[in-house]
């Protein structure tokens, strides 16, 4: 099990959190997504390594950005 942490910018409400969680959750191998709205911190658990690019693309699809 691999765990990665990212910071997502632009989230302002519970709907934002749900959108990010849903899009990241669609990535093959992702087994869990925890999103903290106040800090923008997103923790992704996966059965196999997931690329940063895949996470960034999913966050972008939700309408937000991963901080560099």
Image: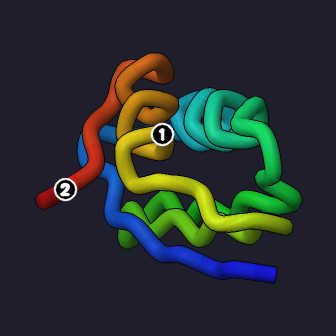
Which of pointers 2 and 1 indicates the residue nearer the eye?
1
Task: Name the residue that disc number 1 marks.
Answer: 54
Name the outermost residue toward the left: 68
Q: Nearer the viewer, residue 1 or 65?
A: 1
For the point 52% across and 64% down, which residue is it?
A: 42
Q: Position of residue 43 (x, y in %)?
A: 59, 71
Q: Nearer the viewer, residue 26 or 15?
A: 26
Check residue 29 in the rendering and tell me which mark sits there, or answer none. Answer: none
Residue 18 image position (x, y, % from top left): 68, 35
Location of the C terminus (image quadrant): bottom left
Name the residue carrying label 2.
Answer: 67
Residue 47 x, y percent position in the rendering: 84, 67
Q: Residue at x 52, y 33 (%)?
A: 16
Q: Is residue 63 left or right of residue 44?
A: left
Q: CA distance from mark 2 to mark 1?
A: 14 Å
Q: How crowded is the residue under tag 1: few (<14 C-alpha within 10 Å), some, or many (20+)?
A: few
Is disc 1 placed on a helix, strand or loop? helix
Left/right of residue 47 with respect to residue 41 in the rendered view: right
| Depicted 23 relative to depicted 25: above or below | above
Task: Tell me the quarter of the picture where residue 19 sits.
Answer: top right
Which residue is outermost to the front? 48
Above or below: residue 54 compared with residue 3: above
| Number of residues whose C-alpha sits closer than 10 Å to that of mark 2, classed few (under 14), some (14–19) or many (20 or more) | few
Can see residue 49?
yes
Q: Secondary structure at mark 2?
A: loop
């Amino acid at each position: 099990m691999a765990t990665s942490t990212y910071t997502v910018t632009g989230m302002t409400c519970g709907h934002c959190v749900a959108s990010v969680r849903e899009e990241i959750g669609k990535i093959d191998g992702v087994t869990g997504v925890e999103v903290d709205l106040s800090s923008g911190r997103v923790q992704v658990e996966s059965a196999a390594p997931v690329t940063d690019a895949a996470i960034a693309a999913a966050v972008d699809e939700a309408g937000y950005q991963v901080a560099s």
